Image: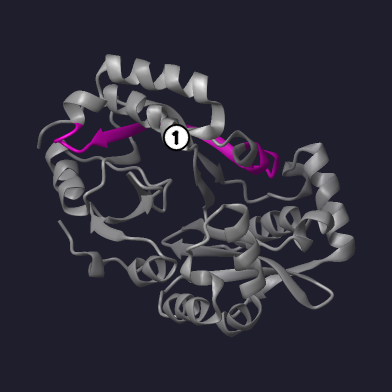
């Protein structure tokens, strides 16, 4: 196992407010109250159950969720653009119309960390409020300064901004490593909705990356558990293709016998149907289903 300080993105994600753990060649961050996922989350990982048990014991999280090439887990997918000719013709028709509207009102360009530092706070505040994350450290200028300071130290990390009338209304942070680029963070202010700035930002970012001779692909993560249908549809309409992959989930060894049982999963599913969206913790039944189908080698 690697210590968390061994991964280049550790300080960046800690500044964003995440708990981090480095293991198996990737960084793991907390998702909600119970789970870990790998960063970038499209990274395919092959690991033993013992490796994951050690990670979960150290992190005190109940589950680790990740793509794998092993024939285990459940069917899922990662989102990629690998077409060097990516452009307007790659977009779904309505998305292309939104991009055209965005082009009339906004501009997109790469930005330096100082620009993001001085203009990014409004996007952060609006994004955190939409997500119901009132405790995020990046809603203050001091907290956001820490993020930009950490980002500036990471080789291959870069930012793109969408501007309307000289004002930053959305930004995207991506990490280039070897010949691949992974989108990591995308925040927007309310002003980006009516101007379709988010649509333009996704398109221009992806087109710019794929025009570079050294790059062979852009990833925007994986299909999540539970699926976030509107977000995944947005990415697909932006020209990203779902590449099939197995999604594995490993539960902490102390809770595995109970939580992975068919009885527990059935009870949680019935409670979810009864409660509707009121008990978001019950969304984790999708993780439990994946865990019940995941069978990794012990070493």
Q: Which of 29 and 203 is in front in this view?
A: 29
What segment carries the magenta color?
233-255
Q: Mark 1 points at which residue?
A: 225
Q: Residue at x 20, y 38 (%)?
A: 252
Whole-percent x, y for residue 27 in the image: 31, 57
Whole-percent x, y for residue 177 in the image: 42, 62
Q: Which residue is drawn at 51% across and 19% down?
A: 273
Q: Which residue is drawn at 66% across and 71% down?
A: 122
Whole-percent x, y for residue 66 in the image: 35, 40
Residue 235 among magenta residues: yes
Residue 18, relative to residue 252: is it above or below? below
Question: Which quadrant would residue 48 be assigned to in this image?
Answer: top left
Apparent side of residue 123 relative to residue 225 in the rendered image (left or right): right
Whole-percent x, y for residue 69 in the image: 32, 34
Q: Is mark 1 on a helix, strand or loop?
A: loop
Question: Which quadrant would residue 12 be assigned to in this image?
Answer: bottom left
**Crowding near pointer 1: few (<14 within 10 Å), some, many (20+)?**
some
Residue 105, relative to residue 231: is it above or below? below
Apparent side of residue 84 relative to residue 152 in the rendered image (left or right): right
Apparent side of residue 178 relative to residue 49 in the rendered image (left or right): right
Q: How many marks?
A: 1
Question: Which quadrant would residue 34 be assigned to in this image?
Answer: top left
Residue 272 shows in this picture: yes
């Amino acid at each position: 196992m690697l210590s968390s300080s061994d991964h280049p993105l550790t300080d960046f994600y800690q500044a964003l407010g995440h708990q981090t753990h480095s293991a198996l060649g990737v960084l793991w961050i907390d998702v909600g109250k119970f789970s870990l996922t790998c960063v970038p989350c499209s990274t395919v990982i092959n690991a033993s159950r013992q490796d994951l048990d050690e990670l979960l014991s150290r992190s005190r999280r109940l589950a680790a969720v990740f793509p794998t090439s092993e024939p285990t887990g459940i069917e899922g997918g990662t989102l990629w653009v690998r077409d060097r000719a990516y452009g307007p013709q790659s977009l779904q028709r309505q998305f292309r119309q939104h991009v055209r509207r965005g082009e009339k009102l906004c501009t997109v360009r790469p930005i330096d960390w100082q620009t993001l530092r001085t203009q990014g706070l409004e996007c952060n505040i609006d994004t955190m409020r939409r997500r119901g994350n009132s405790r995020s450290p990046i809603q203050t200028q001091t907290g956001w300064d820490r993020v930009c300071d950490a980002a500036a130290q990471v080789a291959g990390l870069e930012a793109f901004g969408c501007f309307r009338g000289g004002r930053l209304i959305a930004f995207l942070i991506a990490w280039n490593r070897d010949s691949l680029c992974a989108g990591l963070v995308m925040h927007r202010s309310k002003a980006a909705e009516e101007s379709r700035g988010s649509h333009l930002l996704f398109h221009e970012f992806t087109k710019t990356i794929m025009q570079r001779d050294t790059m062979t692909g852009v990833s925007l993560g994986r299909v999540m558990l539970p699926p976030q249908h509107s977000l995944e549809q947005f990415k697909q309409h932006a020209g990203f293709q779902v590449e099939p992959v197995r999604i594995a989930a490993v539960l902490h060894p102390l809770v595995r016998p109970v939580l992975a049982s068919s009885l527990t999963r059935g009870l949680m599913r019935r409670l979810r149907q009864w409660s509707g969206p009121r008990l978001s913790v019950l969304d984790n039944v999708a993780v439990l289903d994946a865990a019940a189908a995941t069978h990794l080698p012990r070493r």
